[in-house]
Image (cartoon, rainbow, N blue to C red):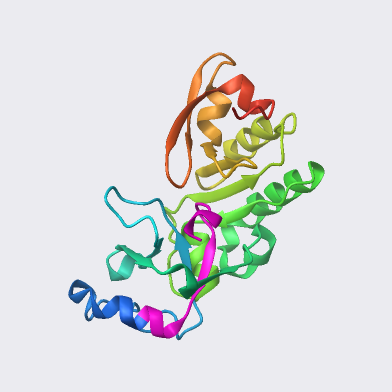
Amino acid sequence: MAEAYRRHDLLDVEPRAWATALAGRSDLAGVPHVAAWIEAGRPVILRRSHPGEDTALVPVGLPLPPRDGKRRIGLALPPNAVRPRPPVLLAEARGAWPVSWAATLDAIIALGERRNLSPRPFGSLLWQSLTGLPYLSERSDLDLLWPVADAIPPSLLDGLAAIEASSPMRLDGEIVFADGGGVNWRELHAAAPGETVLVKHRDRLALREAGALRAGVLA
């Protein structure tokens, strides 16, 4: 079922279903990489549904590299045409990141290890590591997901802010909770306990108190 998947989940697609979906999208004819995307062994990513989309289908997307227009391609596929792929951990993307990022990435991985967390890349670093195509540039942000089971470990947000202060890139991304909701770590770090921050789910947006989120209270 589509509801079984969450934002940022990676999905493999059955090749015939991919071809069928593209056959109904004349606007994608000749767009670089798209026709051969699945045959090349590349996944798609679960995206948020657009208003009016068929809720029985799984909304997926893929971004093109900047040199090919940086276009975001969105499709909706039958549930039986996709299967989940394990997430990529930050440490597994080591070969894709620039040398100038190495010290920052090592510090982030160490921060996660001290708190029993495994950050995951998304955005440019994820797609470069998955495809070998050139997504990263000197101006790229580092986008990370930090899945947590309940309360956010003490000093995680402060630790990220401290690392960013001396990093060559902007650190962006989300804390991802057990219910699949994600909140921008920077917004959560800046918010007072009683202030509200935006939490994004696959099918909805919600405002939650920052203090409750830090304590792992999601309702």
Q: Quadrant of residue 68?
A: bottom left
Q: Quadrant of residue 154?
A: top right
Q: Is residue 164 above or below residue 44?
A: above
Q: Nearer the viewer, residue 146 or 114?
A: 146
Q: Quadrant of residue 165?
A: top right
User: Going 23% across and 81% down the picture, which residue do you hit?
Assistant: 30
Q: In this rendering, would 25 be left or right of 126?
A: left
Q: Nearer the viewer, residue 99 or 37?
A: 37
| Residue 8 screen position, x and y as percent | 51, 55
Q: Is residue 189 above or below residue 62?
A: above
Instruction: State whether residue 93 appears in this view.
Output: yes
User: Going 42% across and 55% down the picture, which residue do you hit?
Assistant: 47
User: Going 47% across and 56% down the picture, which residue do you hit?
Assistant: 123
| Residue 9 screen position, x and y as percent | 54, 59
User: Going 46% across and 75% down the picture, which residue do you hit?
Assistant: 81
Q: In this rendering, would 27 be left or right of 147?
A: left
Q: Is residue 28 above or below residue 16?
A: above
Q: In this rendering, would 51 be left or right of 193?
A: left
Q: Nearer the viewer, residue 84 or 93?
A: 84
Instruction: State whether residue 32 appears in this view.
Output: no
Q: Which residues are magenta?
A: 1-18
| Residue 56 screen position, x and y as percent | 40, 59
Number of numbered tags placed on the structure image: 0
Q: Is residue 7 magenta?
A: yes
| Residue 110 screen position, x and y as percent | 76, 48
Q: Is residue 73 magenta?
A: no
Q: Nearer the viewer, residue 120 or 194?
A: 194
Image quadrant holding the C terminus, namely: top right
- The residue most toward the top is 194
